[in-house]
Structures are given as C-alpha cells and as structure tokens.
Image: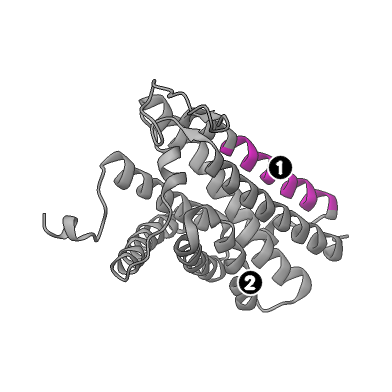
Amino acid sequence: MTDWTAFAVGVGLLTAALLFLTHRSRRTLDRVRIVGVDEPAGAVSEPAAADPPRPVLTTRALLANVAVSQALALAALAALAWWTEVPAAAFGLAPDAATPRLLAVGAVAGVLLYLGNEAAAALARRAGYSPSTRLREAMAPTTRGEWGLLLGVVVPVIAATEEAAFRGALVGALAVGLGLDPWLLVAGSSVAFGLGHGAQGRLGVAVAALLGAALGALFVATGSLPAVVVAHYVVDALEFGVREGLGREPFSDEAASR
C-alpha cells in the first residue's frame, strides 16, 4: 500500500537537500579557478603571494561531478518511490507515456521553449539585466570527448533527474496521492526549480522559473514524464550547442544584424 505521507515528506526533504547543495555548489564555483574561463587551458597561473590558494577545476571534472551528483539524486528519488510504493504511473511513467507521438511533442516543445527562453533573456539584457554565464562557460566542452560526455551523459542525466523531481514527483505524484490541484503544484515546483538555478544569478532564477512553469504545463497536458524529459534535454542541448558550440547569441543585436 502506498505511503503517500512518507513520500511527500521524503520528496520535501530531498528537494530541500537539492536546493541546499545547489547553493553550496554556487559558492564553491565562485571560489575556484576554472581552466578555460578564468585562465587559458593548459596554463595554470600562480596566485599572488597575498592571495589564498584557489583550487583549479577543469571542464571534464565539473561535468563528471555534475553527472554523478545528479545520478545519485535520481537514485535517491527512485529508492524513495520504491520504499513508499508509489506507482510509476503517478510520475507520468504509464506504459503509453513514451509513444513516438509524445516524444515528438516533447522535442517540438523543447525547440519552442528554447526560443522562448532565449527571447526572454534577450529582452532582459536590453532592459539592463544579465544572467550569470559562469556555470555554462565552465561546463562548455572544448574537445569532442567533452561534447560527447556533455550531450550523451550529463545533459540526459540532468534532464531526467530534474524532471523526475520537479515534475514527476512534485506535480504528478503529489497530485495523485494527496489530491492537490496539479496547477497549484506546478506553480510551487516552478519556484523551487528556479531557485535550483541560483548559479545563473537572479535573472537566471526568473527565467528558469518560467521555463519550469512551461514544462509543468506540458507535463499536466500530456501526463508523460518522458515527453518533458525530451523537452528539457532539447532546451539544454540547444543552449550549449548554439551558445558554446556555434558561439552565437540568439536574439542579440549582433545576431539580428547578420
């Protein structure tokens, strides 16, 4: 028999832990020197005598750390769902949740959400607000191997973990188990999702919250966790591919003049 109370408490604690770790990782990222961002690749400059030593972080190490930490979070959520006997269907994992049509809907939605995300960021920049790009630049691949690691491992794990937590658990499962309005849960989970992107600055938090609301709406409309995982993957993959791979800033004045 499903123990919905234990599951709700567990999901709340897990979400709080994720937000706390996100806050700590942001502070850690500010304290380290990132090869390729703070200094050229292959050249580690010595700090001044009066400065405390700063650890050096490489892109590959950061990608591996992100993949492992996100995978552990996903495993913890899966263990909680197994222990409390929450059915997979409550997460949006019904047998028909990954049909080609739903996956295609997720892919198309991902492209549209990426464009909307970039348009919102461009408007904010023109208004004088800029998101922090340090994390994205730190994760930006410089070799084919790193691109394979990013797009083949890290981004899929991030998409699966965040959607399972913020949409599957906080929206789908809690709506089924506690009888709460899913749209109210979408609003709450979107705020938490935005706070989880604090490394991108205040603007990044706001844009992520809007993206979370859109992904939540897609989840409620389709009832499919795989669909929103695909959408999330497409958004992140396009952001890295266009900004870091092609070196372009969509909707910028420079892009518009080309």
**Residue 85 appears in which quarter of the rendering?**
bottom right
Tell which tag, 2 or 1, sits nearer the viewer: 2
Side (left or right) of 19 relative to 105: right
Measure the C-alpha gap from mark 2 to mark 1: 23 Å
Residue that sits furthest to the front in the current view: 50
Dot 1 surroundings within 10 Å: few (below 14), some, or many (20 or more)? few
Q: Nearer the viewer, residue 60 or 156?
A: 60
Q: Position of residue 69 (x, y in %)?
A: 64, 39
Identified by mark 2, the residue type is Gly
Residue that sits furthest to the top in the current view: 42
Residue that sits furthest to the left in the current view: 258
Pick the quarter of the image with the N terminus.
bottom right
In the rendered view, would you say 219 is above or below 39?
below
In the rendered view, would you say 131 is above or below 59?
below
Residue at the spot 49% in from the left edge and 34% down from the top edge: 33
In the rendered view, would you say 209 is above or below 29?
below
Side (left or right) of 190 relative to 201: right
Asked if residue 197 shows in the view, the reply is: no
Q: Position of residue 113 (x, y in %)?
A: 39, 62
Q: How many marks?
A: 2
Asked if residue 155 shows in the view, the reply is: yes
Pick the quarter of the image with the C terminus.
bottom left
Q: Secondary structure at mark 1?
A: helix
In the rendered view, would you say 79 is above or below 210?
above
**In terms of sequence position, does the residue under pointer 2 or pointer 1 come before the other?**
1
Residue at the spot 59% in from the left edge and 74% down from the top edge: 187
Disc number for residue 188:
2
Q: Nearer the viewer, residue 219 or 39?
A: 39
Q: Which residues are magenta?
A: 66-83
**Residue on which the image places disc 1:** 75
Residue at the spot 62% in from the left edge and 60% down from the top edge: 166
